[in-house]
Image (cartoon, helix red, strand yellow):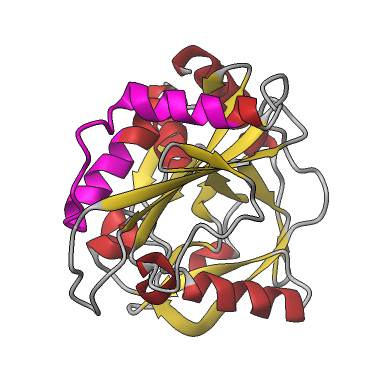
Amino acid sequence: MVNFNGKLVAKQEDILSAENRGFKYGDALFESVRFVAGTIFFWEDHYFRLMASMRILRMEIPMEFTLEFLESEIKRTVQKNGLEDGPVRVRITVFRNDGGLYNPLSNNVSYLIEAVSMDASFYLLNDGPYEVELFKDYYVNKDMLSNLKTTNKILNVVGSVFAKENGYNNCLLINNDKQVVEGINGNLFIVNGKTIKTPPLQDGCLNGIARKKVMDVIEASEELELAESSISPFELQKADEMFLTNSIQGIVTISKYRKKEYGNSMAKSLLGKLNAKARLES
């Protein structure tokens, strides 16, 4: 079952028209959240990012779109699918209502909530091989729209196809200045000794929730130093570790880039602290 504007319907049911603006123009936003034992990991951060993104895209925020309302709709969707006893991946998509060409007839919105079961209740570290390569065919724009979690993800789709065709687990995306911005499905961090570096939002990376939480963990440590600055491709092979972050997987460690192989001791330590932070803040 999926939740379309508060109505729970079968996944197979036709609920979106041919005029859907998310389909026709990518005029939509989404949040992917982890739901465990009745709580949503970092829900306030996800909610306020969604509201801020809607304002940037000039979508009309419904009066009922409170934090409590959307949380209750998520819980209702999870329960209707019989998934409340296990970990769940939830996706909330918000799109401008049908009508218009590039210029919409209305800024009013609809929402769709989906729920799918997951294996683990908390973030687990991937121990197997995980090789990445630069994707250089197309570039991430250095602007605020790139910071938003919109459904305009054709660059990520083409990059994923490239990775699959060439036997890579993921690709790293670059911007017009040829700086490394992020992975296909996560923010990038590189480790050199006690310094952990991640690209700034000004370079065009997603304003990720897991990115923010990992940065909080690093800044709270007396031993570690956080550097939020541009990363050139030449730095990648000099790093001790590289990892990606996203709200569903937490931290994904990169084991190989070209001829360089990486450890994961720092990522393992940070993942434990991220899990602890999830328990405290959820």
Residue extending farthest to the top is: 280
Residue 84 x %, y %: 66, 22
Q: Nearer the viewer, residue 158 or 266?
A: 158
Give the magenta-colored segment's residue range: 48-77
Q: Nearer the viewer, residue 90 or 269?
A: 90
Q: Give above or below for 71 relative to 168.
A: above
Residue 270 x %, y %: 58, 30
Q: Residue at x 38, y 72 (%)?
A: 19
Residue 104 x %, y %: 20, 70
Answer with the quarter of the image where residue 5 lies: top left
Residue extending farthest to the right is: 128
Q: Give above or below for 91 relative to 204.
A: above
Q: Give above or below for 244 relative to 142.
A: above
From the viewer's perspective, is 203 left or right of 20?
A: left
Q: Give above or below for 185 relative to 71.
A: below
Residue extending farthest to the bottom is: 137
Residue 99 x %, y %: 27, 70
User: Can the viewer see residue 42?
Assistant: no
From the viewer's perspective, is 157 left or right of 258?
A: left
Q: Residue at x 55, y 15 (%)?
A: 279
Q: Nearer the viewer, residue 78 or 35?
A: 78
Report the label total: 0
User: Can the viewer see residue 109?
Assistant: yes
Q: Residue at x 34, y 79 (%)?
A: 176
Residue 65: in magenta span: yes
